Structure formats: C-alpha cells, structure tokens
Image (cartoon, helix red, strand yellow):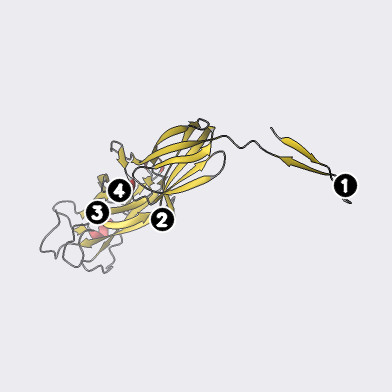
Amino acid sequence: MKRLALLLAATVLGTGCIVVDDDPVPSGRLDVTWSFVRTKYDLSTVNYGCARAGVDSVTLSFSRGGSRTFACAPGGASQVSVEAGSQSVTVTGYRGAVPLYSSQFTVNVPQNGTAPLAAAVYGIPGDMTIWAHFREWNGADVGWSTCALAGVTTLTWSLVDYGGTVIDTSSMACTNPAGVTYAGASALDRDTYTIRMQGFPPTGPETFDSATTQVAPTCSGQPFNHYGSAGDWDVILYAVDLNPTFCP
C-alpha cells in the first residue's frame, strides 16, 4: 500500500502533496551452483567446471529486472539477493567478453528465505565450416587447389574442445572444395578448438597432415576460436613425402 501524506503549508505556492511508498519489494536469496554442458555428436553428456570450460565469469539475468555478474568460482554464488516469488533466471558463462554457455531456469524464491538453483548451462551453438588447404612441406602454395590436384581422395580429422574432449573424429570422401560443415542440429558450440586433419590417396599411407610443419612433425592440432554464430576456418595440410618420421 501507499500512504498519502498531505502536507499543508501556508506559503505563497499553496498546498503541496507528496506520495510516499513505505512497502519495500519482498526479497529472498538464491544459492546458485553451475556446471557447463556439452552434448554433441556421439558423446554422453560432458559436464565441465569453470577451469575446464574456460569460463571466466557468470552473469545471472532476472526476468523481473536486473542482473548480477560473478567470477566463475567452482562453488557458484551463494546468498544472492533477489526479488521474492517465481521468475526466470538466465545463466550465461563468459570467456572474456564472449558468451559461450547460456541457459534459462525458473526459480521460486521464498520471502526472507533461500532457494537453491543447480544450473546445468549448455553451450551456445553456431554454424562452422572447416576448409582443407593442401600445401608443400614448407607451407608454400603450389597450386593444389582441389583434392584431385593434391592426389587426395579421403580426409580424416579429429576435433578437440577447450576441455580436451574429442568432439568429433570422422572421415569423408575429399570433395571440392574440401572441408566439413557443422550446421543446424550439428552446429558447433562456441569454444576454442584444435583440429588435426589428414589426407590420403586412393591407396597407401597419408600424403598430407596438418600436424606436420617444416618436415618435423609436431603431432598436435591446429587451434582456432569459434566465437561467433557462423564462421570459417582454414586448416593447412602439409605434404609429408619428405618426412623422416610420422605422427601416429
């Protein structure tokens, strides 16, 4: 309720009227724990903590207005003051300024009480195409602009996320242009990934490998950031014909 206070004063301006709200908004508290979830391709659900997900901060946005941002601590955030009653809360995990995970939840906070929220926050997907480019052992572009010119008929690859989980390992016929697209229901969650891609002729061992540079194999994937809703990444595959040793 509002109390209407009539203040009468014998002034040259006449009578003033002031409305005073003496009923504060009922409030309670929210205890939030969070984990970050990726369920892509043939994986069972993978739940990450802050460090493995690479999440720096978490923002809670409330449907009744306002938001709060916290450092991403393993224990979550406790005793967060919120308006009492039922409302939705959007939990978003950020790496720097980039939102990587976000999900919405409904909570019912009792007045002067505490409600728990165990937030399993899902990755934000976006379309992505990874293109294969064939180069000489030293990275020189010698005109292998198609699979046929490079003598490659099959591509294989392994895609690993920031947390070290193999998201996808596959092979496909080398098409023109050569590459793999993750889109729609198979869109790739925003993250930093590494990929190792190999090219094979019709028979025999690999002839191109992205894990090889300057003759010496590094045996590691090429990293790239997939931070937007759509994007492309070029993977360089190096000719391995001069290599004295090969990555497994």
* Res 198 → quadrant: bottom left
Q: Mark 1 points at which residue?
A: 10
Element marked by disc 1:
loop
Residue furthest front in the image: 10
Label 1 crowd (10 A; few <14 / some 14-19 / many >=20): few
Q: Of the residues tagged 2 and 1, which is closer to the observer?
A: 1
Q: Of the residues tagged 3 and 4, which is closer to the observer?
A: 4
Circles 2 and 1 in contact, beta carbons < 8 Å: no
Q: Name the residue under label 2.
A: 96
Alpha-carbon span between mark 4 and mark 2: 15 Å
Label 4 crowd (10 A; few <14 / some 14-19 / many >=20): some
Q: Name the residue rendered at 26%, 69% in the picture.
A: 140
Q: Can residue 177 be seen in this view?
A: no
Q: Name the residue rendered at 21%, 65% in the picture.
A: 213
Q: Name the residue rendered at 40%, 53% in the picture.
A: 227
Circles 1 and 3 in contact, beta carbons < 8 Å: no
Q: Earlier in the sequence, mark 3 or mark 4?
A: 4
Residue 181: image location, x then y, percent: 35, 48
Circles 1 and 4 in contact, beta carbons < 8 Å: no
Q: Which of marks 2 and 1 is nearer the N terminus?
A: 1
Q: Where residue 52 is drawn, which disc sits there? A: 4
Q: In this view, does 95 lie above or below 244?
A: above
Alpha-carbon span between mark 3 and mark 4: 24 Å
Q: Which amino acid does label 1 sit on?
A: Ala
Q: Which of marks 4 and 2 is nearer the N terminus?
A: 4
Closer-to-camera residue (179/145) = 179
Residue furthest right in the image: 12
